């Protein structure tokens, strides 16, 4: 074989270049995946969302009673949603802080009025009356704040429903335990009453049996000797006896014997 016609050996691949190409391709894939997952409307507003989340919890949920905090969040969401649904109607873009309901759920609780301001409502005075009027420049904040309230309410209302079921179950268990104790008490009283009645009947029957089966008291026996009084026909005990002829003869013999002895 002609040496000039020999095939030159293949060049060795550059491992660094291959690794770099693979890394670039993987980076492109990661960026595409991230862009597909993240909503475009929230891409640059992560920090603002976090601020609204912190204003809700701990800002509103922790310092206020839980039912009031949830009602306040629902009121804030209603204010925001009315503007979103009816952007051209001025009546939905303001609220009066002296209104009794607004005062109770937005002015008095901690953190709620601050949230309304963050949504875009700012205090103004019209005809010497105080109002909070929405500024359209804060429309983006209104959308973000409303979305964060929905997120919190979905979480908290589920938790509230679970707590209500738990409290209802605990109350049902407590009521059942109380009813069981009461029933046991009534059953015990009833059982004791039955036992007492049986004992009373048994005592009455025993007394009746004793009264019916006991003999009459026997007369006291008189063991004193019966001696006849002379000429009286009575014993010392007062018993009257009939003296027959034999007794008279015996008596006469005894009398004669006594008489002979005297002689």
Image (cartoon, grey):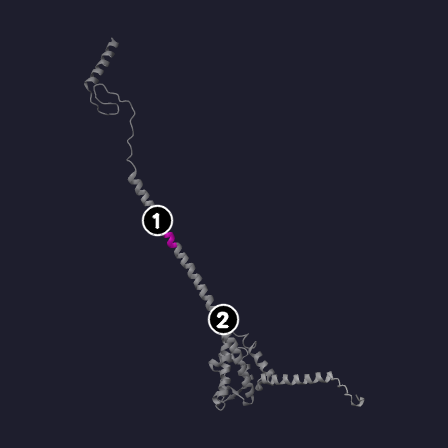
Q: Secondary structure under badge 1? A: helix
Name of the residue lying farthest toward the left:
245
Q: Which residue is drawn at the image coordinates 20% and 17% (left, top)?
A: 246
Which residue matches tag 1?
Answer: 198
Residue 129 can be seen in this image: no
Position of residue 95 measured from the top left corner of the image (x, y, whole percent): 49, 85
Residue numbers of the magenta segment: 189-193
Q: Is residue 36 magenta?
A: no
Q: Main secondary structure of the magenta part?
A: helix
Residue 145 can be seen in this image: yes
Q: Which residue is drawn at the image coordinates 34% and 45% (left, top)?
A: 203
Name of the residue lying farthest toward the front:
1
Please identify the quarter of the rendering in which residue 141 is found.
bottom right
Q: Residues within 10 Å of mark 1 (few under 14, many from 20)?
A: few
Position of residue 259 measured from the top left corner of the image (x, y, whole percent): 23, 11
Which residue matches tag 2?
Answer: 163
Q: Which residue is drawn at the image coordinates 44% and 66% (left, top)?
A: 172
Q: Nearer the viewer, residue 163 or 102?
A: 163
Please identify the quarter of the rendering in which residue 42 is found.
bottom right
Left or right, 67 with reference to 222 = right
Circles 1 and 2, Cβ within 8 Å, touching? The answer is no
């Amino acid at each position: 074989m002609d040496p000039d016609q020999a095939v030159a050996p293949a060049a060795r691949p550059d491992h660094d270049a291959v690794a770099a190409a693979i890394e670039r391709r993987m980076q492109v894939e990661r960026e595409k995946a991230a862009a597909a997952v993240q909503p475009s409307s929230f891409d640059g507003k992560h920090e603002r969302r976090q601020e609204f989340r912190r204003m809700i919890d701990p800002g509103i949920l922790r310092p206020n009673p839980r039912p009031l905090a949830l009602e306040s969040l629902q009121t804030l969401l209603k204010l925001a949603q009315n503007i979103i649904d009816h952007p051209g109607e001025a009546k939905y873009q303001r609220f009066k802080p002296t209104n009794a309901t607004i005062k109770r759920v937005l002015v008095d609780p901690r953190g709620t009025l601050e949230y309304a301001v963050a949504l875009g409502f700012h205090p103004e005075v019209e005809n010497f009356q105080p109002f909070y009027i929405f500024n359209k420049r804060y429309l983006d904040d209104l959308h973000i704040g409303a979305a964060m309230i929905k997120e919190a309410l979905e979480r908290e209302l589920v938790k509230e429903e679970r707590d209500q079921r738990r409290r209802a179950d605990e109350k049902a268990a407590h009521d059942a335990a109380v009813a069981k104790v009461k029933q046991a008490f009534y059953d015990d009283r009833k059982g004791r009453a039955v036992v007492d009645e049986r004992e009373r009947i048994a005592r009455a029957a025993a007394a009746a049996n004793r009264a019916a089966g006991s003999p009459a008291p026997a007369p006291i026996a008189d063991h004193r000797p019966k001696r006849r009084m002379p000429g009286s026909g009575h014993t010392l005990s007062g018993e009257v006896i009939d003296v027959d002829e034999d007794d008279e003869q015996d008596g006469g013999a005894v009398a004669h014997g006594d008489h002979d002895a005297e002689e």
